[in-house]
Image (tube, coloured by chain):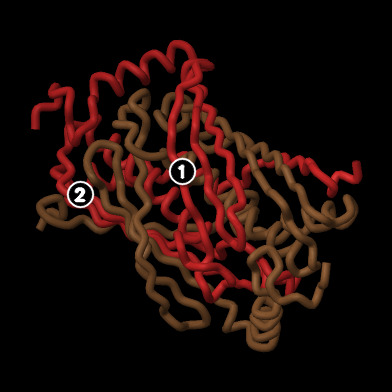
Chain colours: A red, B brown
């Protein structure tokens, strides 16, 4: 594999190195802000709109809708993946980018990559039935199936780096500070 | 509002109370296991398949695909939401279920619910450019717009409960233990 080829695994490695160089020089260029708006659609259904994001202070438009619903067994209509499955998908999708970017920068061709993720909830937490039951995932278990050109040592090093640098892995493995504001509108506002 | 009406906001509140009663009696019935499989589709694209989940040890089939891609500015093709947006969508969708279930159980009619969520990444973390830069979200900021029948005090109490019991909020606000296994297949396995 010619490491100088810019396109590796569908990633423009020249552009990736250039982006990294620009951000190393001016960290403000590496500030990526994401924003979504979720609207309730009846029952347990919701649509989340993704309309813009910002990179280095510059707004960039998008146009996507993510649908979610609970299965019938959890009082929904089963019309879409549920929020817990969407969380696992977000985790896996982020790791996928990490492996492919990492391999591409080393000139390693990826033939296939498949990531399985499992997690279990104790619904007593969500239902408020037991103060001892955590509402969230007790643990997440990943199995990464990678078929790529590199040596096992090289691929293991890339795996270790992905585990350290994946944004969504970090957001799940570390506590993320949160700030929530409830705005009551209509008659519920007491107005 | 007649609190005894089983369908409130599209939620069968009788069924929800029944489910909670069954799980209170036998916590094993409240074990919900989720599983997704993500396949790399070239570049930064991936498809995540949701084919089954388990409730109380019983497997239930599903059939959904969640697509992800990075925007062009982050070396992708911009064909789908990116993993960070999907994470925010999963968070919001979970909170939506919490507000609607909470209001429904109290017989409170929800007219509209919209949740905005913002988060920022410092891409130096993902790019490994600085050990001081966290790869994940520094913080998440939520604004919940709720138009519902209840008193402000009642709705605030439901909000506080959602913040305590949302599974995906918990998974992001608390560290989730993880176990990852790398399986090398094909020539990369050194076989």
Depth order, front residue of B62/A100 = B62
In the structure shown, which secondary structural element does the residue marked by tag 2 occupy?
A: helix
Residue B164 at what x, y percent from top left? Answer: 73, 58
Is residue A31 depicted above or below B66 in this figure? above
Q: Is residue B71 above or below residue B155?
A: above
Q: CA distance from mark 2 to mark 1?
A: 39 Å
* Along the line of sight, the residue nearer the viewer: A49 or B54: A49
Q: Are marks 2 and 1 on the same chain?
A: yes
Residue picked out by circle 1: A65
Instruction: Quadrant for residue B25, please give it.
Output: bottom right
Which quarter of the picture shows residue B71?
top left
* Disc number for residue A152: 2
Left or right, residue A68 beside residue A113:
right
Q: Position of residue A190 (x, y in %)?
A: 90, 45
Q: Is residue B171 at all visible to an observer of this figure?
A: no
- Residue displayed at 15% across by 47% down: A111
Q: Nearer the viewer, mark 2 or mark 1?
A: 1
**Chain under disc 1:** A
User: Does dot 1 land on a helix, a strand or a loop?
Assistant: strand
Could one spot residue B184 in this view of the protein?
yes
Decide if residue B14 is on the left or right side of residue B36.
Answer: right
Residue at 47% in and 54% down? A86
């Amino acid at each position: 594999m010619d490491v100088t080829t810019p396109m590796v695994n569908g990633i423009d490695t020249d552009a990736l190195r250039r982006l990294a160089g620009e951000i190393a020089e001016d960290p403000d260029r590496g500030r990526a802000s994401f924003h979504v708006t979720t609207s309730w659609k009846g029952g347990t259904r919701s649509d989340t709109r993704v309309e813009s994001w910002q990179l280095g202070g510059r707004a960039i438009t998008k146009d996507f809708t993510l649908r979610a619903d609970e299965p019938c067994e959890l009082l929904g209509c089963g019309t879409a993946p549920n929020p817990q499955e969407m969380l696992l998908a977000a985790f896996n999708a982020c790791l996928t980018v990490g492996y492919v970017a990492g391999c591409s920068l080393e000139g390693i061709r990826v033939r296939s990559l498949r990531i399985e993720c499992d997690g279990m909830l104790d619904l007593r937490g969500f239902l408020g039935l037991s103060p001892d039951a955590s509402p969230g995932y007790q643990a997440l278990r990943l199995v990464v199936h990678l078929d790529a050109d590199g040596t096992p040592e090289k691929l293991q090093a890339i795996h270790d780096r992905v585990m350290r640098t994946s944004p969504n892995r970090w957001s799940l493995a570390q506590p993320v500070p949160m700030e929530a504001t409830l705005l009551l509108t209509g008659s519920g506002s007491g107005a």
